[in-house]
Image (tube, rainbow, N blue to C red):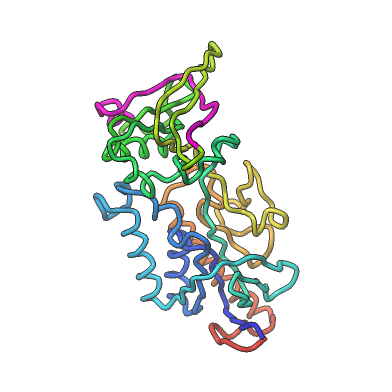
Amino acid sequence: MAEQRRTKVLIVGSGPAGYTAGVYASRAMLEPILVQGIEPGGQLTTTTDVENWPGETEIQGPDLMVNMEAHAKAMGTEIIGDIITSIDFDKRPFVCQSDSGTEYVADAIILATGARAKWLGLPSEEKFKGFGVSACATCDGFFYRGQDIAVIGGGNTAVEEALFLTNFASKVTLIHRRDELRAEKILQDRLFKNPKVDILWDHQLEEVYGADNPLGVEGIKVKNVKTGDVRDLAVKGVFVAIGHAPANELVKDVLETHMGGYVVTKPDSTETSVPGVYAAGDLTDHKYRQAVTSAGMGCMAALEAERWLAEQADAGEPEPAVANEPESA
């Protein structure tokens, strides 16, 4: 029979929000279980220089997440490399199914599943994914040494990706559908000063084309959004950096959402529309989307879960599940 794990607090996700929730829940003696999910460490594991984390003038994104995981583990969080595939919100304790077959039973849940890269939805983009089309410069930039490549987007993500890719590429063309960038001014200044970067204003990607055997990108077609003119651009790689969408697959049909799928929480709180379920980080934050604000929400979620569990006990609710005790289902 499948193994069953019981815990007072189950944390679903492992970015800054999840690991911080683990630290605070552990300090509250709740002995939390944290299930890392499909991308352990979250988006920061695919980020290079992090310059806005308090206490670190500069740190690599993967290193920061290794530190946070180690901190949560040292405090007492049990960290499991598994993926939660469904959650039954209809009764308490909550029952969660996982990819491994293990069943997790929890009195409270902290959702910290984060966000994932958006795609344009072009058939040619889908065709060449992994063969010249990517959404992760830190993952794939190394493969384009000495090549001409394109970055699609105009926000922080796009500018950061473009700057990083200049370490490998001979030329980086940033393609943006507007005539000004949305990125922070300090990033724009760096971009404009970099001799390897060209910016193609008022254009959008229409098509990616290339060879079929072996599969590989040879160029793109871009359209001027003002004139409608289409032109070809010879590139070997295309990096799509148009933002992220909340990873809400587990909860989108149960919890209240807004702003394109972000989970709604009560004002000045991480409480969701289901008592005992809390949401933190990029799953709920459509405004700031920063590592430090995600960590702050992870702290809030753990503290609120602790207080809610105490209130349930005071109200005469059944005893919470004994944390972290494996048993047969």
259 w.r.t. 300: above or below: above
Q: Which residues are magenta?
A: 187-211
| The image quarter in which residue 318 lies | bottom right
Magenta span includes 195: yes
Considering depth in this image, is 65 or 230 the residue closer to the camera? 230
Residue reaching furthest to the right = 90
Q: Quadrant of the N terminus?
A: bottom right
Residue under the point 49% across and 79% down: 31
Residue reaching furthest to the top = 227
Counting from the top left corner in percent of width and height, residue 206 is at: 55, 26
| The image quarter in which residue 70 lies | bottom left
Residue under the point 46% across and 26% down: 176
Magenta span includes 198: yes
Counting the numbered discs, the total is 0
**Left or right: 122 with respect to 89?**
left
| The image quarter in which residue 238 lies | top left
Residue under the point 53% across and 48% down: 285
Counting from the top left corner in percent of width and height, residue 249 is at: 64, 55
Considering depth in this image, is 316 or 133 the residue closer to the camera? 133
1 w.r.t. 187: above or below: below
Considering depth in this image, is 175 or 5 the residue closer to the camera? 175
Counting from the top left corner in percent of width and height, residue 175 is at: 43, 26
